[in-house]
Amino acid sequence: MKYGIYYAYWEQEWGGDVIPYIHRVKRLGFDILEVGCHNFIDVDDDYLRLVKQTAEEEGIMLTGGYGNDIHHNISSSDPAVVRASMEKFEGTFRKMYTAGIHKLGGSLYSYWPVDYSRPIDKPGDWKRAVRNMRELADIAKEYEITLGMEVLNRFEGYLLNTCAEAVDYVSEVDRENVKVMLDTFHMNIEEDSFGDAVRLAGKLLGHVHVGEANRRPPSAKGRIPWAEIGVALNDIHYDGTVVMEPFVRPGGTVGNEIRIWRDLSEGAANEQLDADAANAVRFLRGLWG
């Protein structure tokens, strides 16, 4: 397996210069840097080519995270919203290809965070999300991009809350570059069994996010059953990407949207955050191989 970390661990905004983080994660012992692609469509191509070059020189794989807003939602009943979403996606895919990013995960099938003051039409949204994801997957394939359908907890999303729902959705979409994406933070809320969920995903599992129940980096001190998850990943012969997505600092757009209302880092400086991240990747490698 290849292990990575999301650069927003150190940041309070979704945008920013990712190049220093390529060097940083290499030094800390990671194989992957995951970056936010929310604003890629506005990023200069020369910069993205430099991102690709830097990652190649360091031997770091880049993966992407993405969250649609309510105005870019492929499950919407409004054709104009769907059209805007498709256009933004294709522009983002084009930028990702320039940066050498070939894997994108998140609530690509809906929008995030969900506004629950609005009516929810899960059956209708599901039908539209399946139909439009087929088209989106075909566009993504032109840019050699695989799409991960991230399973979210009930407080952040409603379309895919469990691995079983994600398996049904991905099977219905029926595109080779559309995969299930599991996240231990969300699984901790929704799944009856971590191991059973991983086994259910099986060959459809394309990307894994890891973190403790309170979104700290993985460690032996938390309560996520890392050994159980590792056994299940081994059972399905998973040899893909594993990216930790810790969020520990309040403030900024990241803190507000992730709902971090206390300092989980306990005032840690960046040096301590680096040490915690390095310890976390050593912990997972030692446990999972």
Image (cartoon, rainbow, N blue to C red):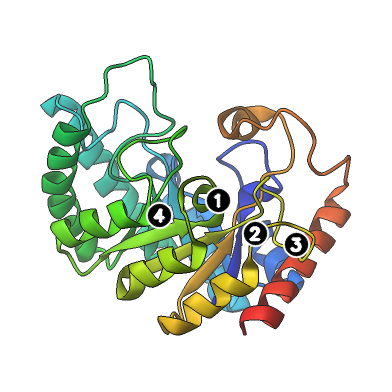
Lower position in the chain sequence, tag 3 or tag 1: 1
Q: Residue at x 43, y 36 (%)?
A: 154
What amino acid is labelled 4 in the image? Gly
Residue shown at 20% from the left, 57% from the top: 137
SS at badge 3: helix
As drawn, 48 above or below 214: below
Q: Residue at position x 49%, y 83% from top?
A: 234
Q: Earlier in the sequence, mark 3 or mark 4?
A: 4
Label located before the other in sequence (1 or 2): 1
Contact? badges 2 and 4 (CB < 8 Å): no
Q: Which mark is residue 285?
A: none
Q: Residues within 10 Å of mark 3 (few under 14, many from 20)?
A: many
Q: Which residue is tagged 3?
A: 277
Disc 2 crowd, CA 10 A, few/some/many (<14, 14-19, 20+): many
Q: Nearer the observer, disc 3 or disc 1? A: 1
Amino acid at the residue labelled 3: Ala
Front disc: 2 or 4: 2
Give how far apart the Cα atoms at labels 2 and 3 are: 17 Å
Q: Amino acid at mark 2?
A: Ile
For disc 1, the marked residue is 188
Q: Which residue is mark 2?
A: 224
Asked if the residue under mark 4 is in contact with the one under mark 3, i.e. CB atoms within 8 Å, the reply is: no
Q: Nearer the viewer, mark 2 or mark 3?
A: 2
The span from disc 1 to disc 2 (Cα, nearest Å) is: 8 Å
- Which of pointers 2 and 3 lies earlier in the amino acid sequence? 2
- Distance in Å between CA atoms under marks 3 and 1: 21 Å
Q: Which mark is residue 105?
A: 4
First in residue order: circle 4 vs circle 1:
4
**Which one is in front in this view, the residue at disc 4 or the one at disc 1?**
1
**Spatial distance from mark 4 to mark 1, Cα to Cα?**
19 Å
Disc 1 marks which amino acid? Asn
